[in-house]
Amino acid sequence: MLRDITIGQYYSADSVLHRMDPRTKLLGTMIYLVSLFLFDSAPVYALAAVFLGVVIMLSKVPFSYMVKGLKSILFLLLFTVFMNMLFVKGEVIWSFWKLQVTREGLRKSGFMAARLILLILGSNLMTLTTTPTRLTNAMESVMKPLKLIKVPVHEIAMMMSIALRFIPILLDETDKIMKAQLARGADFESGNLIRKAKSMVPVLVPLFISAFRRANDLAMAMEARCYHGGKGRTQMKPLKYAGRDFAAYAVLLLYLAGVIVIGKFL
Amino acid sequence: MGIIHINKVKYEYIRRDEENNVEGITTAVDGVSLAVEPGEFIAILGHNGSGKSTLAKHLNAILCPSEGSVVVDGMDTQDEDHLLQIRQTAGMVFQNPDNQIIGQIVEEDVGFGPENMGVPTKEIWERVEESLKAVGMYEYRSYSPNKLSGGQKQRVSIASVIAMHPKCIILDEPTAMLDPMGRKEVIRAVRALNDVEKITMILITHYMEEVIYADRVFVMDKGKVAMSGTPKEIFSRVSELRDLRLDVPQVTELAYELKCAGLPLPDGILTREELTEALQKVRKMRDRREQE
Amino acid sequence: MEDMKLIADHLVYEYNKGTNQTVRALDDVNFVIRTGEFIGLIGHTGSGKSTLVQHLNALLKPDSGTIYYDGADVFEKGYDRKALRGKVGLVFQYPEHQLFEETVFKEVCYGPINMGLDTKEVEMTAYAAIKRVGLPDECIDQSPFDLSGGQKRRVAIASVLAMKPEILVLDEPTAGLDPKGRDELLSMIVELREKEGITVVLVSHSMEDVAEYVERIIVMDKGKILYDDVPKAVFSHAEELEAIGLAAPQVTYILKDLKAAGFDVDTTGITLAEAKETILQALTWKH
């Protein structure tokens, strides 16, 4: 059931993208996401799609695996598309009762869908090729200036990294508890919303208890291994830019320039 | 010079009901004294709730005694200034394999301790490599812990402790949640580290087969040390162990049953070889008797 | 046919389909469970035994093949799988981790309520189940979280028993218990079977426990059934079992050692009592 969620899970492989500095990937993803919002034009989306396609190929993550990750947002996707299709005013091409589909609506929803898909795939690719530790390291490093205004950057990064480590474990656990309650005759599917919500109590209570137990155990294990905050701590894998990162930044700039040129002049 | 001195340690905690009123006081550890010499392999046995895990948590200052004292390598555990040094000297491996691995990747987890201690980057890598090799997990260094078996995870946890270069490792029921194969893997690693690296081991468990290699065994009950001695001495006292909700290894049990049936066998047989040998002696005795 | 309570028919099940990490957890698994049997299911971690038990009450749907219960295909459209879960009671590993209610009594009532029984029946079966697992009366109104580890586990087992299952499947019921707790729990299961004739499937890592209690052993390896026979026959394959990370009971090895040392013992013994008897016989020891 829950095993199908691929968002945020690391996909182990050996590729240029996997080896890249996480800061490059983090900033690169941000630049890519921004590029999707600059222009509403078909050629720009085509360029963005091709660019992402090439990067996915470089990452060695199978396309089918990436597409599977989209399944979980299918509902959101259809919903936005329908809303845009029905409520954007303009030249009517098809109508039924009070609902109207306009040319502009169709165009807008098409762009919306393209943007959403590229957005999800793009950010998904980052988490698929970067271990959460490296990602949090990158965030800690990128956010370092915030330390000056007393933001506990190290602590935030550590919390995120622990949360990420436990997501798969807790998902597994949820699966196990749901099955255990199903074995006791539970029914999570039928009934109205309130009944459904009620039927989740036997899952949520054990899940919370387990999460607290794990948190307690983990805190003890961290203390036993001399954890005492960020002070005086060294790093096993300090971040260091390599040639491929500079190359990646160059490619990204070229891409951004391409987007701007196409968006402005085509 | 002992490495750990436990001196009349008592640990009490207050039970409270839902309204936070005091319900009573539970004494989890009740006046335990024992000393551990460097390089020893100590086993602490006891049924669930006998106080053995609570005692273990005193040995690296996760808990502090209500009365008495614990001294690790000359440092009192109540002395806040030595906290980090104590935890470095006496490392701890816990029961649940999932809840003590902090890193996303095996090698990152092993590096976590040295990072906290401020070890320079290059040396962290050396320590990680040597520790993973010591428990036979080096080839898994880039795996996600979620992809490992329970026994492998516990070996990683042991490596993570070794990377801090401790003098002593406390293992708090490291095999309770493992299958028989995982249990063997972990015990083999523990014995090897004790034999080769001379690291002092304190193993807390309720699996009898695991303690037969220990130098000394302590059996706990109701917060007190109920029995102590070599494994042979302990396992000679089958009926007492049963009264303490414990068992003996099946070989020992069989020898005990045979003895009860009248065979002149010695007490405390721990291995198959010992039993075969003892039975051969019995056979010789029988043959001699028949000749007479 | 009348006795074939549950038939597993060519079960195939795969994890992580469509990735580079597909695992075939069940690979053409076939067997029959008859009423009143006491079956031990063994295999090392990852052999597919946990996946298999989740098929027995239709928690997992096989990719191909099916399960017949009382002659009916349980994966057919319209089959009442909820009712099936009452008849094939599955107790998971560490079942105390699924407890959620305020009192032991409410906890045990959860199953029968889901089965749609009326209030009186629910309360009667729940009370009976609490008694059957040997919990004292004063536990009933306590929070399950205040009990000891062994007692929590009994509550969890009672909550499955309260659905009055015909087959009881227990996945590693003694994991994490101390020796006494383990013995108590196993004798409770034996008693349940003897007194009420419940069919029991026991998943276990302990060869000694399996040898002592069950009548038939199913050995799983890499998703396939390797052996399905009486314990003596299965444990005569000690070397093959070792090759897949299992073993014969310790006493069997002792008997083999003795045989090699020239004692005339019966090496098919798998329990302590059998070993004792054959050793005494071989020595013809007179008191």
Image (cartoon, coloured by chain):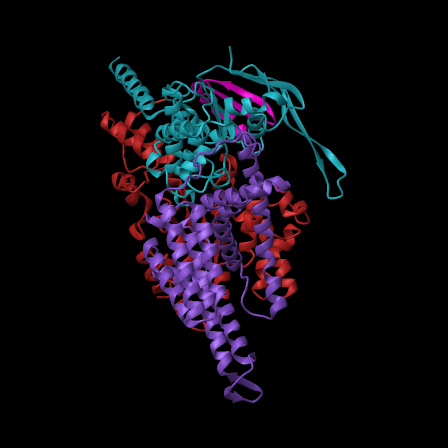
- Counting from the top left corner in percent of width and height, residue B167 is at 47, 20
- Counting from the top left corner in percent of width and height, residue A236 is at 44, 34
Name above or below for residue A65 compared with residue C265.
below
- Counting from the top left corner in percent of width and height, residue A250 is at 38, 52
Name above or below for residue A157 compared with residue A69.
above
- Magenta span has B231? yes
Display colour for chain B? cyan
Chain seen in purple: A
Chain seen in red: C
Residue at image x 63%, y 53%? C101
In terms of depth relative to the viewer, which is nearer, B31 or B140? B140
- Counting from the top left corner in percent of width and height, residue C250 is at 35, 33
Q: Is residue A16 left or right of residue B246?
A: left
Image quadrant containing the C terminus of chain C: top left
Name above or below for residue B215 compared with residue B17.
above
In terms of depth relative to the viewer, which is nearer, C182 or A55? A55
Q: Exactly how many numbered labels are in the figure?
A: 0
Residue C259 seen from this side: yes
In terms of depth relative to the viewer, which is nearer, A217 or C2? A217
Q: Residue furthest front?
A: A265
Q: Residue furthest top?
A: B1
Residue B254 seen from this side: no
Image quadrant containing the N terminus of chain C: bottom left
Q: Which residues are magenta?
A: B217-244
- Magenta span has C81? no
Q: Is residue B78 left or right of residue C197?
A: right
